[in-house]
Image (cartoon, rainbow, N blue to C red):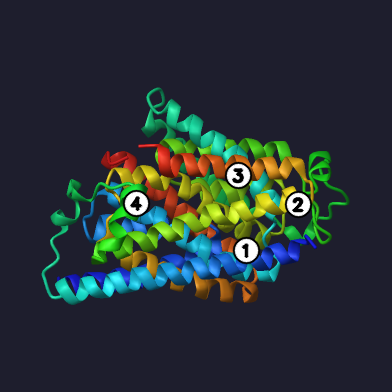
Amino acid sequence: MYDMKKTEIMMSIILTVGMIISIILILSGGILYLLQYGNDIMRYDSLQLDAYKTSIIEIWKSAFTLSPYALIELGIFILVITQAVRVALLAWYYAAIKDTIFSLISVFIISVLIYSLFFRY
Amino acid sequence: MTILTFSAVLLIFSFFAGLLGALTGLGGGVVIIPVLVLLFHINIHYAMGASLISVIATSSGTAIAYLREGYINLRIGLFLETSAVVGALLGALLIAFVSKSFLAVLFSLLLFFSAYLTMKRKEHLENYQTSHPWAIALKLDKANYHVQNVPLALGIMGFAGLISGLLGIGSGALKVLAMDQALRLPYKVSTTTSNFMIGLTAAVSVGIYFAHGYIQPVIVFPVSLGVLMGAFAGARVLPRIHTSSLRIIFSIVICFMGIQMLYKTIAGTL
């Protein structure tokens, strides 16, 4: 039932789905952005303003505005969150085979990930 | 230069970054940072933000293929990651007490020395009969290889975490080193397991970069797409590349990283 091969296959599926969703979001955001501004001259100083300060929670809130930036940021967010999901899958697997040390290790890593993504500013 | 040209040029460079990252286990930052900083004169913080995203993209883009090929050792990856995470948290606390330039010089010397060690190891002449007792207790070894000095690897990983907490980069090189030199794993197991881990380490730092506004969508969108494509390509190529060629590529890349570190120290942009 709980063999490693199945877990690895599940992890591949999670990674593939996560990547496809984020590629679609980033690509559509990028194309929208280029359609609007593609022929403008690049001004590097405008890239480096404070205006982009954001947080994971704000990305989620602004995602539904469907602006190019929001789409790209949501795509990046999904790419990042996939990292936590794959460790969560391992935690579940090690718990299922009653490997205490490794399920604790996985839980520890997820906790640090969640703490630093959502609660550290 | 128009925005379209900028995005296209960045996309091409990012493809090579992803390719190189997938082969070496280092992520794409070693290419992305100098391209953004030296070619486009973008502030180092934004370059590091883009670099973090490129590391996560490489890690995700290669993991599927490397899992399927059976290279990645998940238990070793998770076990070593704990020590890196603790090191990274400590590093963030120590930031006020340690001289960054001293650490950068130390780290670049360490990179040159790692390149030498990487080239020196002759895997095919080694013949370990058994694994380190900790490795046996934690079931880290596999049927086709043994696992050696676990405590030393933990020490190197803790230091790697400390360095990345303090300097924001460079943990990938020490991860590969810990597995190659301390655990004495087959080289492709070391680089692919490192690829699996670096995404987790980078994800830990990414929240802070978002909060400071250093993840700039206009820079990050060509970077992430290019790196993902490059990483897919690299993961397909890896099984066909000979280990000794990979060692040479890795050594060149980390020497280049060492030079970058020294340059940054001298230019005062650390």
Find residue B49 and name its label: 4
Seen in the picture, residue B218 relative to B155 is either above or below; the reply is: below
Residues at marks 1 and 2, CA–CA distance in whole angstroms: 15 Å
Q: In this view, does B208 lie to the left or right of B157?
A: left
Query: Is the N terminus of chain B in the top left, top right, bottom left or bottom right quadrant?
Result: bottom left
Same-chain status of marks 4 and 2: no
Q: What percent of the width, then of the height, locates residue B168?
A: 41, 42
Seen in the picture, residue B240 relative to B154 is either above or below; the reply is: below
Quarter where residue A120 is shown:
top left
Same-chain status of marks 1 and 3: no
Chain where mark 2 sits: A
Q: What percent of the width, then of the height, locates residue A107?
A: 62, 43
Same-chain status of marks 3 and 2: no
Q: What percent of the width, then of the height, locates residue B229?
A: 44, 73
Q: Residue furthest top?
A: B97
Q: What residue type is labelled 3?
A: Glu
Residue depicted at x 11% and y 69%: A41
Quarter where residue A13 is shown:
bottom right
Residues at marks 1 and 3, CA–CA distance in whole angstroms: 18 Å
Q: Which amino acid does label 2 sit on?
A: Ala
Residue depicted at x 68% and y 37%: B152
Seen in the picture, residue B5 relative to A119 is either above or below; the reply is: below
Q: Name the residue under label 3.
A: B81
Helix or strand or loop: what does disc 3 sit on?
helix
Precedes in sequence: disc 4 or disc 3 = 4
Q: Which amino acid does label 4 sit on?
A: Gly
Find residue A11 and name its label: 1
Q: Do the residues labelled 4 and 3 touch (CB within 8 Å)?
A: no
